[in-house]
Amino acid sequence: MNHEPRTMNQMRYYPAYLDVKGRRCLVVGGGRVGTRKVGTLLQCGAEVTVISRQATPELAQMAEQGLIDLQLRDFRSSDLDRTFLVIGATDDQALNRMVHREAEAAQRLCNIADQPDLCNFVLPSIVNQGHLTIAISTAGKSPAFAKFLRRQLQDRFGPAYGVMLDLMGAVRQRLLAQAHAPEQHKPLFEKLIQGGLLELIESDDRQGIDALLESVLGPDFKYETLMQSP
C-alpha cells in the first residue's frame, strides 16, 4: 500500500474579495498609477487618503470635489494609523520599501504596485459587468497574461450577465419577502437558467423573459417591475 503523505496544490495567495466600503484606505503616490488605484477604491466606497508631493490633475479635481483627502507631502509612518489598506504607487524604490516595511510592522494590508515581493496581497485583473466581478490573478508571475485573459473574458461575459445578475437578485429579494425558505430558491433559479433566461436577456426579448418568469415563478413576477425594485 502507498502510505506517502498526501500533498495539496500550493497557492501563494488566498483568494478573497475585500469590503472596503467606509474603510480608510491610503494611497502613497499621486501619479498615473496611483490615480488609477484611487479610482477603483472610490468605486468600492472606500474613504481614500492620498499622500504625495505631486498629484495628477485628476486627483486634484477629486480633492476639490471632496472625494478624497489629498495631502501634498512626504509619507510618514503615522499615516498608517487607523488605515485598513495601503497601496504604494511611486517610482521611488526606497520609498516603496519604506511603505512596505511600515505597513508590515503595523500589520496592514499592503500592495506595492508592480512589486509582488513587497505585497501581502495582490490586485487582480478585473472583469466587471454590473455587480458581476471576475478576478484574474497569476500570483504576480505575469501581469501581461492576466490582462490578456481579462480581454478575452470581457468579450465572453458581456453586459447581459450583469443584467441577469440584477434580475436574479431582484427575484431572490421578492421570494424572501414572500417568506419562501431560502433552500427552495435553488431549483427555481436553475429552471430560469436552464430555460434560457440569459439568451432572452441577450436578445432583449421582454415578452419571452416575462413568459419564462411567469412559468417558473407565477404571474406576479414581471421584468420591468423587478428591475425597478430598490
Image (spheres, grey):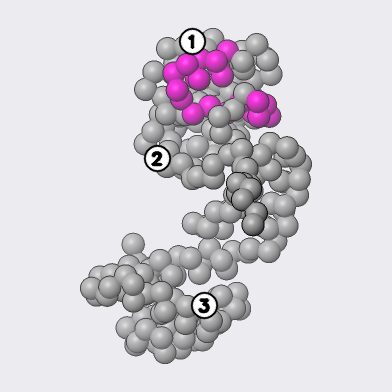
Q: Residue furthest left?
A: 179
Numbered badge on residue 21: 2
Query: CA separation, marks 3 and 2?
Result: 31 Å
Q: Magenta residues, as a range? A: 98-117
Give residue 78's quadrant in the image.
top left
**Residue 79, percent from left and from top:** 44, 16
**Residue matched to label 3:** 193
Asked whether residue 210 is in view, the answer is: no
Using the image, determine if residue 49 lies above or below residue 22: above
**Residue matched to label 1:** 76
- Nearer-the-camera pick, 196 or 202: 196
Asked whether residue 101 is in view, the answer is: yes
Give residue 174's quadrant in the image.
bottom left
Query: CA separation, marks 2 and 1?
Result: 24 Å
- Taking the spot 48% from the left edge, 65% from the top edge, the residue there is 165
The amino acid type found where label 3 is placed reads: Ile
Q: Which SS class for mark 2?
A: loop
